Amino acid sequence: MELIDRFFKFPDSDFFLFGPRGTGKSTLLRQHFPEAMTIDLLDPEQVRILRAYPERLAERVRALPDGHVIVIDEVQKVPDLLDVVHQLIEEKRGWRFVLTGSSARKVKRAGVDLLAGRALLRTLHPFMAAELGKRFQLEEALQSGMLPVVWAASQPGEVLRTYVALYLREEVQMEALVRNVGNFSRFLEAISFSQGGLLNVSAVSRECQVERKVVENYIGILEDLLLSFRVPVFTRRAKRALVAHPKFYFFDAGVYRSLRPSGPLDRPEEVHGAGLEGLIAQHLRAWKAYGGEEYELCYWRTPSGAEVDFIVYGTGGFWAIEVKNSARVQARDLRGLRSFTAEYPESRGLLLYRGKEHLRMHDILCVPCEEFLCQLRSGRGIDEGL
């Protein structure tokens, strides 16, 4: 696989590195820490030994010179190791621990509040367009997503079809997270229709014929496995009533497309529009995670229907972003942005569309989606390169 330089910035201390399977955590760490002692907990023998005798980790680490780097891959497989790591950090021998995980549930449950703050928390996301440079193709990204494990495959569609099955088998079934895998599979298909929309748990429950409480638990499992996220409504200094439900997204546009069924009754613009919005959302999350400043990622919608897809608010700027899966910009496309910027004049409005030209309409900058994605990178403002 071709090595791609990532925007991820390595801390100088112990840290957790969370991210879904296939985002390239192991590859990134091997590249950055080639001399590290690595404990791969995807190896069944390692898991068997360390589950039975977690203290073996301490014995192995104490045989290393001071200041050595220890990488524990997929630490959620043996969460008891976190107590041992905590003890070794307290010895202050200069060892540096890097702990990766693709499931937050077990780590947070057994992690002594993530080692009582002694290790930083970082996340790794699918590729950003600017990391790929000229290799990025918008249509390909919408169809296959940005997961490194898929991007590097000769048959990305086949890899995507097996990706969810991997989680079902190795994370859901083996860890006994759900009792009925058939119900969970129907839920995955049903909730794919929620991509980019308000999360209505009752509607999902009716669609997949699973009890509401069970569906709420399933959504929690998706979030714990880092496969989905919610975007809350922006309520700062609100002058009017706003909707309360968050919006739902899968973490990768390709994973969404692999789950979303399509047929004669499904309009292509609905499927493609939700995929494009999800692709923008995952890029904004990665930009936010890799930068050095704190930002909130929200959306804005009034009960009357005025809406802006994304609000990015933080110390470095305040942006309102609308995404349109259309090659032309019409006046009605700007209504939500104009309403928001009138209420929040400190914000900058930005409309992303599928055309080719830069436009400025009613003081709102309209930019091609592909150009926006390719210039978005950590360490600078969202519209700095436009």
Image (spheres, rainbow, N blue to C red):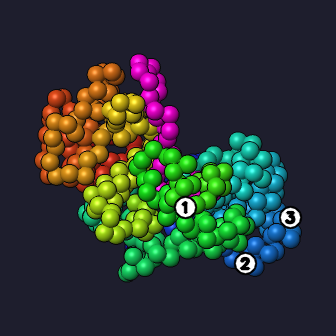
Q: Is residue 349 left or right of residue 208?
A: left
The alpha-carbon separation of the residues under discs 1 and 3 comes to: 45 Å
Q: Is residue 293 magenta?
A: no
Q: Earlier in the sequence, mark 1 or mark 3?
A: 3
The alpha-carbon separation of the residues under discs 1 and 2 comes to: 35 Å
Q: Residue at x 15, y 33 (%)?
A: 361
The residue where tag 2 is placed is 44
Q: Nearer the viewer, residue 365 or 182?
A: 182
Pinpoint residue 328: horizontal percent, then vertical percent.
14, 48
Residue 351 against residue 65 in the figure, above or below = above
The residue where tag 1 is placed is 208
As helix, strand or loop, the secondary structure at mark 2 comes to helix
| Magenta part of the chain | 221-250
Q: Earlier in the sequence, mark 1 or mark 2?
A: 2
Q: Earlier in the sequence, mark 2 or mark 3?
A: 2
Q: Is residue 313 left or right of residue 74?
A: left
Q: Type of residue at label 2?
A: Pro
As helix, strand or loop, the secondary structure at mark 1 comes to helix
Q: Residue at x 51, y 67 (%)?
A: 22
The residue where tag 3 is placed is 55
Q: Residue at x 18, y 29 (%)?
A: 363
Mark 2 surroundings within 10 Å by alpha-carbon count, few (fewer than 14), some (14 through 19), many (20 or more):
few
